[in-house]
Structure formats: structure tokens, C-alpha cells
Amino acid sequence: MRNTVLAAVILFLAGTIIAATAHKVGDAALGTIPYDRFEKNEVCAQCHTDIARQYAQSLMSQSFTHQWDEAEYFELAVPHAEKLAKVAGVKAGCNGCHAPLAFLAGDIPPKRPEAGTRANEGVSCDVCHSITGFEGEVPFNFNYIIEPGETKQGVRTGTESPHHTIAANPFLASAEFCGTCHNEKDPWGMWVKATQLEWKESPQGKAGITCQQCHMPAAPGNSAPDAGGQDHPDVRQHLFHGAHWPDMLNGAVQVGIVGASDTVHPGKAVRFLATVMNIKAGHMIPSGSAEERVVWLDVNAVDSNGRVYHLKVNPKGFKGEELTISSPGTLAYQDIGDIKGLEGFAGLERDGDVPAGDRIFRLPYLDEQGRMTVAQWNTASFGPDYRLAPLKATNETFTWKLPRNIATGPVTVTATVWYSRVVSSVARYMGLPEEEYVPVKMGESSFRLMVTAG
């Protein structure tokens, strides 16, 4: 009898310990871990000086304070969550990735960045280095398992720190680690972010080239040079370079253009073939918050007198193609008016400053009424996925009937692929700085044609 009672007590205590140490994830983790359980970034920077400086210039450190993220959350997501029950969860849920310290502490909504709360730390050092894994079969919607404390998660064995213990955890080197925030399913069950899922199906994913190998490249160095750290040949650089770094965008897409002939007479038509290829990214271009990104192909001809002629893409005829060809004057994003309670809000220019007739490589996000939206949480369906897949090429044709009075001599036809981080019409409406929507060149190629007298 005594042994039975003792066994029961042991089982009870074991169950209590398990229950006490069970880690809630995703939405259930809201308010479960106070701010003070996490080290501040400046504490980490005392030893990890170079890495901390790299991290500080990245969007990981600015995930809450970045101007577009702030405007989208406070001016669109929060009002919408308070108005529509279907999307009520985004009021807290956005912070699961953009301000995880605030989410875990239950500080919802966090005060705006000017208040200087710990929400401003964004995806902090201690957040990433406290994640031990994820729950379920697919990483998404901040379903990371997080265990803050004296032990920090890393990827290297045989190293020591004077400030904390180190647990070698291969999960931190996996694409699934990134997928806990870079995959997102919205209230309608739509994959509004699927970067890790795209990677998984890519040639890079199948070859085992992970997110970290591009966005955290390894280099010889010392991760803690001011604290007696060891030199290593493969220290991960905490750059996290992505869409906000022109050097990452330049050359990510290649384009080549050729003409059907080398000579043409005034008044005659000539056809051009432009081949566009996602040569570098192991995911779709654009990826992530694809609803707000704009990638487009612009083709222009310049004659021997310097006159510029803009060429429009030849339609292919697939369903929904009109959403992938720029049409100035076409309005979208009317749900901004619904969210803000603006009577008679007609919408904003769907394609911003993209020239008429240019091909846009996009995945249109559509609300319940079939209107394009930049509020990703309000996505009920998608239009055609006409983005650039990893290591795959897309051909676009352009037919140009030369004016009869065009100057004879050489004509240079140039194809350029441009990238804008936010649709310019939306960016201006939301008061964003120009750097958020100014076009960045991704790739360019030219073809020379001779115009000869007929």
C-alpha cells in the first residue's frame, strides 16, 4: 500500500513538473512569459560586438519600429481587428513575429515606438537564441517553442561563455527555424507568407542550401572578440540582408532581350523576346509579404535621335492576366476605406508608378469582395501566381510598330526589371518615406537594332 501511494505521489509530482514546464506556442503563448525573462540586446552586445552591430542595421532589429510595419499595424491591423471578429486575432498575432517580447509578455497592443518600450527590441537576440524547436509538422504563425533562461541556443559545440551556458541546437541552422515566422496562414486559411514552403520545393531547398547560407553567410571570424572568444572559420554573419538591401536585389533577377531581326524599316513591326529569370533567390520573387511588393519588366527603345519609345507587353491570355499588366487609373485597395471607416473611399492606384503595359510579376491578394488588398490578414483568395520561381525562366514578348518618321540608324532596346518594396500609391497614402517605394534595379539587358530606309 505504501509503495502504491508513493508511486502515485511520484506520478503526480512528475505530472505537475511536466505541466509546469510545458511550453505554449502560437496564439496560446500570449502573455505567458514576462519581459524580464529575456536579456536586452545591449547585454548581448557587450561581448558579441561585431554581430550586434550587424544585427542592429537589419530589419530583424527593426521589425516593430520600421515605419511601414508600424503604420500597417497601428493604422490598419489594429483598427480592423477591433472592427471585424474574423480578424480579431491579428491585434495580438502580428506581434508574435514583429514584437515577440511584447506578445509573450501580453503587452497588446504595444505602445507605439516613440514610447520606447521593450517591444522596440523587435526580434531580439535572446528571442532567437531561446527558441528550441517548433510544434507540429509545419513551421508557421510563430509556432516556435521558446525557453528563455541562462542557456542560449547555438549551433557550435565545444565553446563556452562567461555569461551563459550554450546548448548546441541544429534547429537554429534549419530553414524550419526561419519558417516559424516566414510562413503565415491568415484567418481565411490562406498562405499569405510561404517563403520557407517555397524554399522547400526549390532547387536550393532540395540541394540543402538553407536560408542561413544566403541571409547569414559564414565567414572566418570571432563571435565574441571582446570576451575572449575563439576564432572560427565559419562564423554566421548576422546581416539578414533581404529586400531592403539593394546589393541583395541587384542581380537576383537576370533578363535578356533579343529581336526577331537585326534590321527593320520605318513603319514596319518587329518582335522582341525578353527572358526573365530568378537566378539567385531560393524562393519566389517577390516572396513573404508579396501583396505589397511590386516587381515589373519595363522595355524601352531609344532611336538615334534620342527619342524614347515605351513598349507594352503582349498579353498571353491566361485567366486573371489583367492583374499582371500595369493599367494606370485602375483602382484597388478599397478595403483600406473599410478598415478606416472612410465613406466613399474609391481606392488607390493598383499599380502605383509602374508604366502602362508593363508586365508585373505578382501574386494578387484578394479580399472577400475580390478586390486587391495590401492587408494580408484580409486575404480570402488569390489571383494568378505570376511570380518568378527559383532558377526558372519566363519569356515575355513585345511587338513594336516603328513610326514612319523614326530616325534611321541604331535603336537600342533595353529591358529592365525593377523592384519596389511597397506599391507607391499605398506608400504615399500611408506617409512612408520615398526609400520604401523608390524602384531598385534588379537586372537589365539591351539589344541593338538598325533602322534602315525602306
Image (cartoon, grey):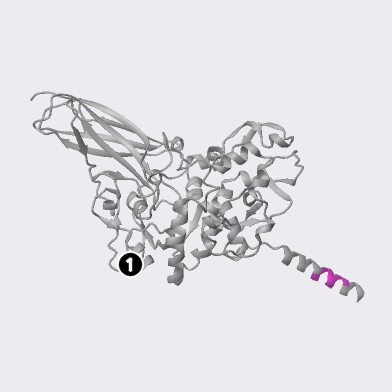
Q: Is residue 169 magenta?
A: no
- The x, y position of residue 235, in whole percent, is 64, 35
Q: Residues within 10 Å of mark 1 (few under 14, many from 20)?
A: few
Label 1 element class: loop
- Residue 149 placement (x, y as % from top left): 72, 54
Q: How many marks?
A: 1
Write down the residue under mark 1.
Answer: 342
Magenta region, main secondary structure: helix
Residue 303 location, quadrant:
top left
Is residue 7 shown in magenta? yes
Expressed as whole percent of the image width and height from the top left, the position of residue 344 reads: 27, 67
Q: Quadrant of residue 343?
A: bottom left
Q: Quadrant of the N terminus?
A: bottom right
412 or 64: which is nearer to us? 64
Q: Is residue 102 above or below residue 160?
A: below
**Residue drawn where x is 44% and y is 66% of the image:** 79
Residue 383 quadrant: bottom left
Q: Is residue 160 above or below residue 178?
A: above
Residue found at the far right of this picture: 2
In the image, taking residue 446 as reference, residue 98 lies left or right, namely right
Left or right placement of residue 412 versus residue 111 in this view: left
Residue type at tag 1: Leu
Q: Residue 167, image x and y in percent? A: 72, 46
Taking the image as drawn, is residue 57 in sight? yes
**420 and 64: which one is in front?**
64
Task: Tell me if residue 25 can be seen.
Answer: no
Residues shaded magenta: 6-12
Side of 404 where 214 appears, left or right: right
Near-viewer residue (120 or 254): 120
**Residue placed furthest toward the front:** 115
Q: Residue at x 59, y 49 (%)?
A: 177
Image quarter hosting the C terminus: top left
